[in-house]
Amino acid sequence: MTVPHDMYIDGCWVESSGRARIEVVDPATEEVVDSVPHATAEDLDAALDAARRGWTVWRETDAWARSAVLRKTAGLLRERAETLAQVLTEEQGKPLPEARAEAAAAADQFDWYADETRRIYGRVVEGRSSTQRLIVIRQPIGPVAAFSPWNFPALLSARKIAPALAAGCSIVIKPAEEAPRTAMLVVQACAEAGLPPGAVNLVTGDPEQISTHLIGSDIIRKVSITGSVPVGRKIMHLCVGGIKPVTMELGGHSPVLVFADTDIEASAETCARAKFRNNGQVCIAASRYFVHESVVEAFTRRFVEITKSLRVGNGREEGVDIGPLSNRRRLDAAESLVADAVDKGAVVAAGGRRPPELSRGFFYEPTVLCEVDDSMKVMHDEPFCPLAPITSFRNMEDAVAKANATPYGLAAYVFTRETRTAFLASEALEAGMIGVNNLVLAAPELPFGGIKMSGFGREGGSEGVESYSVTKVLNMLL
């Protein structure tokens, strides 16, 4: 099949009216593998107008018909999973097994919302007289502007497109310039599944220009963003002028509390393997390990053993566990955080450098830092790279206080065999999602999102489709 590398506007793949393009770089080789259009204001206006017209058609399409399109999209994504995975690894860097899993997860989003399309419920409220009827209905909010990141370009694009379409909205999505073609493949599947022109549109180019132009338009009624806290602030400011609702899934700095009663060997292995998934470039990645002082040495020893066994290399090669970081910014950030920690007394127990055998690409060894303290940036700044700082705690109160001592509140994790400890710790942790004895939180049937500076609103679950709808009251006297 042909892999698209243009914008999708009003049912057609189109070049930029200005003819300028942006290079797409393979992070494993630093070679240019393709290019995508740099949208002009004229292109963005075309996408907005298409979304306006597409909404008038799609919102009148009945729920069963919308469901069928979403279900077919899921099927097409599964049929094309290998192509999607290959493109994803080429432009984002993650190993092929992880890319295949992401392709499957993107398909799951469309499958879930194919069902939720038919479950957008209202309600009837008893009136105060026999002639009064009180009815509450939900309707699509309108055209959506969505911005997806580069770390999970298939899944996170699908997590916005699928519920928006399920609710009856049209959407203009702007994928990250580092990994745009993966999102294009998702949009291609939507289009070929039978969406009317304008229901889904995709633009590429300068993030600031596109966000300012789209959000500033009266056509856009709703905004969704997955990104960093600084980007989230800018998007929120843009939304204020038009008083537009926004769903924001921003940064995280997820703590892990490991209590003494857990299976230390198994917990350490689970934590180490999950930590370095997608090279630590996961918003809900465990990024601060607080281990009870009585077992911290045993936990660290096993964690380091697993970390040292992981193979770093090109994600297209067999047996590779960890690919490159997705861009040079993340590589520079990893080096800076490690240097800061070491300067302040941290000990590098594993990794801590670029692999000497890999002279090209944005590679960095999975790294474990011990003897860390609160003076180090790695304990406060979201790392979003393969760094695992480990420290100890005395009791639950101490652990919870340390875990909550950041402005972030996306995810947190607890490892314990005690039901009481699991509940008390989970309830005390300031995060939107808690994993107990596992670090796999995301599923299409569950709401996904955080609190504090990690954002607000939820994607996934029934809450995901609700955020793309508005409530209307019918108060009728007969």
Image: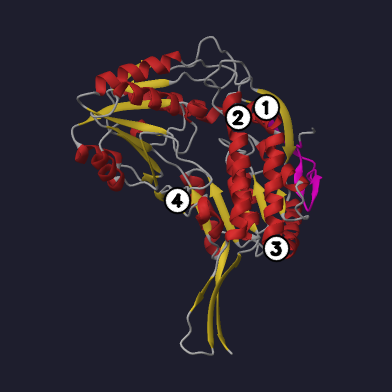
The amino acid sitting under disc 4 is Gly
How many residues crowd around disc 2 within 10 Å: few (fewer than 14), some, or many (20 or more)? many
Label at residue 62: 3
The amino acid sitting under disc 1 is Gln
Label at residue 428: none
Mark 3 vs mark 4: which is more N-terminal?
3
Label at residue 99: 2
Question: In whole angstroms, how far apart are the C-alphas of marks 3 and 1?
Answer: 36 Å
**Rendered image quadrant of residue 14:** top right
Identify the element where label 3 is drawn: loop
Q: Which residue does the image show at 46% across and 87% down from the upper left?
A: 128
The amino acid sitting under disc 3 is Asp
Identify the element where label 4 is drawn: strand
* In magenta segment, residue 16: yes
Placement of 287 over or under 7, stated as above or below? above
Disc 3 or disc 4, which is closer to the eye?
3
In the picture of the structure, the residue carrying the numbered disc 1 is: 86
Mark 2 vs mark 4: which is more N-terminal?
2
